[in-house]
Amino acid sequence: MSAGICLRGPKQLSGVSRPVLVCLVLAAAVRPAGAAPFSPPSNLVAGVSNCDSVVLTWTASPSSGVTGYRIYRNSAIIFTNSSTSTSFTDANPPALTNYTYTVSALKSGTESSPNPSASVAPCPDAVSPAAPASVTASVISYSQVSVAWSRSADVAGPSYEWVSGVQSYQVYRNGTNLIATIVDPFNTYLDTGAPSASSVYYSVRALDGSNNVSGFTVSAAVTTPPPPPGPPTGLTGSARSCSQASLSWTSPANAGSGVASFNVYRDGAIVLAAAANSATNSGLAPSKAYSYAVTTVDTLGRESSQSAPFAITTPACPVPGSSAWNVRLGLGNGRAGIQWVGTTGALYQVECAATPAGPWVPVDAPNTFLGTTNFAIQPSAIWTPTRRRHRRVWS
C-alpha cells in the first residue's frame, strides 16, 4: 500500500517563473508474507507472599527481539520492565481487595497483546482481635445479673491480610460456662439464669469474622441474693368480738434472706404488720364478712405473694343493758357447766380464772343465747376436786 504528497511552488524556466506541482510517493512498511505474529508471554502465575506482596512469574514471549515486559494490575500499568526478566514482585498492594494481573511483551517500541490473566486475594485473617478492656456486672434480682463490657477492635496483621473485624462477643459465667454470644455492636447481656445466693463472676471475649478469638483479660464478680420468701401457710382466725378478729399462720419454708415481719391484708388492703405469727385486727364493723391474707417480708425488704385467703364474719354487738343474772354453776359426769339468765339478742362471753383477781381467760367464743336455759360446758379442768376455778359471764 502507498500514499502520495504533492507540493506546488514556483520554478524558473528560461527566465520565466512558472508554477510546478511536485508529488512524492511514500511506501508503507509491509510485513513479509508468512512472518510470525508478535507473541505475548504465557503461563502467568500470581501468588501472595508473606501476606504483604504478590509475586508474578511467566514464560517469556517466543518472539525474537523482545526487550522487556509491561505489568498491569486491574487493567492499570504498574511497572514497565526494560529487561527480559520473567518475574515481578508487587510489594504492599495498595488495598485489601482482589487483584487481576496481566503481562505484555515489548519489542522495538511496540507492545504485544496481554497474556491470560491471573488473580489473587488477600490472605485470610489470622490475627485475634483485642480483648474487651472492661467488664462490669450488676445484680438485678436473685436470678438476674446485667453484664456490660467495652467494645473491642480487630487487630491488623500484614499489609495484604484481611482484617475481618469484630463480629460478636462470648459471655462466660464462672469461667467455663458459655451462656451467650452477642453480635457486635451490642455490648450488654442480661443473665436470667444466674444461681441464687451465690458468688458469680463473668468474663467476655471477642470474635472476629474469621473466628479468631481474643483472650480473657478481666472479669466481674457479684453475689446474688437468695430467692424472695414464700407466702405464709395455714392462715386461720376468728372474731373475738363484734369489732375485733384474731389471726394466726405458719411461717413459710422458704424464708428468703430471713423473715423480718408479716403484712396482714384485709379485703385487699394492708392493715397492719406483725412481728410474730399472729395478729389482732380491731376497728371492725359488726355483722360483716372480711377476707384476710398474709404476706412474708424478708430482711432485704422483699415481700412474698399473698397467702390463701381466710374469711371471718363479725357478730352483732351486744344489746346495751343485757347483763347476765342468776348465774349458776353445776357439776356432772366429770364436767362443769354454768347457767345464767340473759336478754334475747344479747352476746355473752364466758371466762374463767384461777382467782377472782384474774387474769380472766375466755373459754368459748361470744354467742347469742335466746332463752333462760343457756348452758356453756367446758372440760372438768375448769373445776376439779383439787383445783378450784372461778368463772364469770360478760355481756
Image (spheres, rainbow, N blue to C red):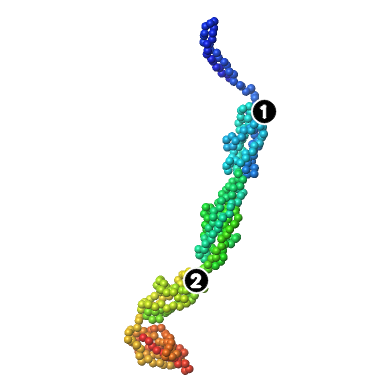
Give the spatial CA distance, label 1 vs label 2.
99 Å
Task: Say if residue 159 shows up in the picture.
Answer: yes
Dot 2, how many residues are within 10 Å of its Cα: few (below 14), some (14-19), or many (20+)? some
Q: Which residue is mark 1?
A: 64
Q: Is residue 296 above or below residue 185?
A: below
Amino acid type, residue under disc 2 in the picture: Thr
Secondary structure under the numbered disc 1 in the rendered image: loop
State the residue lying farthest toward the top. 14
Left or right: residue 325 versus residue 66 is left
* Residue 40 in view (yes/no): no
Choose mark 1 or mark 2, whichever is in front: 2
Amino acid type indicated by mark 1: Ser
Q: Nearer the viewer, residue 368 or 148?
A: 148
Badges 1 and 2: C-beta atoms under 8 Å apart?
no
Specify the label residue 299 is tagged with: 2
Location of residue 385 in the rendering, given as x and y in whole percent from the top left corner: 47, 94
The dot on residue 77 is none
Q: Position of residue 109 (x, y in %)?
A: 62, 27
Quarter of the image with the N terminus in it: top right
Please tell me whether residue 140 is drawn above or below residue 386 in the rendered image: above
Quadrant of the image for the C terminus?
A: bottom left
- Tell me if residue 373 comes above or below residue 20 in the rendering: below
Q: Secondary structure at mark 2?
A: loop
